[in-house]
Image (cartoon, rainbow, N blue to C red):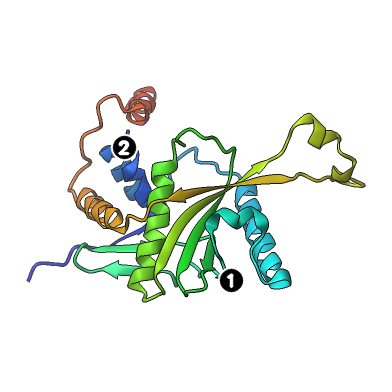
Amino acid sequence: MPAQPEVLRISGKDLGQLALPGSCARCFWLSRKVSKLPYQIFPGIFSSIDSYSKKVVHGWFDRHGRSPDWLAELGEVSGYIDPPHHSKFSFVDEAIGVHLTGAPDGVFTRPDGSLIIGDYKTSRFTTTQDKLLPIYAVQLNAYALIAQRLGWPRVDALALIYTEPVTDESAAAATANQRERGFAMTFSAHIKQVPLEPERVLELMGKAAELCRAEGPPKSRHGCVECARVREMMGLLGD
């Protein structure tokens, strides 16, 4: 009896790499095969700010019984659910052979029992298309698909919640932002709705499984900058 292929474990965010317009199959394959890529540094401060945003929102709900005014674009919201840890928020699709995981930042409830899933992004908000939006859209839809497979209430909406630092000269000079041992920084919130497309996640799960089960690395996308950098590194090493 032939051996069953190994189940691929992947997060919704990592799966979203395949949705980028310039996605390279070879780069994706390498990122799944190497335990840790070199030169990858992500400051922990952004995760801390996202966690703080969640605490601010939950604290407001607990004190006032409603959402903050700056979340009004989400529509009618009646409460929140503490987001589950990624170890408990996942499912295995046996047919595809993928274990999809995630950890949403915010899960809000509507009066009818349906859910809104949100993700906090500490970033400048622009009206133009964010280059990383395809990743974020897959990430949020992965959360929606996981919730569906786990038997959660219906997910009614998905949203990116941008928290943008207010750093102009007037904010820097404001007396209210001065502290004895430092200073305070305020944030401006902006909501970007994301379409519900969970079927897109299933499509990408199948593509990811196919790529990762290949015996060798797939061909590089023509003009891939990252692949060119890898070749340059290998050339310097003489390998």
**Which image quarter: residue 150?**
bottom left
Q: Nearer the viewer, mark 2 or mark 1?
A: 1
Rendered residue at 45%/57% (across/down): 158
Q: Quick one: quadrant of the C terminus?
A: top left
Closer to the N terminus: mark 2 or mark 1? 2
From the image, tell me which residue sits under label 1.
79
Is 232 placed above or below 160 here? above
- Residue 161 place in picture, x, y as percent: 56, 51
| Mark 2 and mark 1: Cα distance apart in space | 38 Å
**Which image quarter: residue 28?**
top left
Q: Does any portion of residue 138 appear in the rendered image?
A: yes
Rendered residue at 36%/56% (across/down): 196
Disc number for residue 213: none
- Residue 174 place in picture, x, y as percent: 86, 38
From the image, tell me which residue sits under label 2.
23
Is 15 placed above or below 229 here? below
* Disc 2, SS: loop
Is 169 placed above or below 58 here? above
- Residue 160 place in picture, x, y as percent: 51, 50
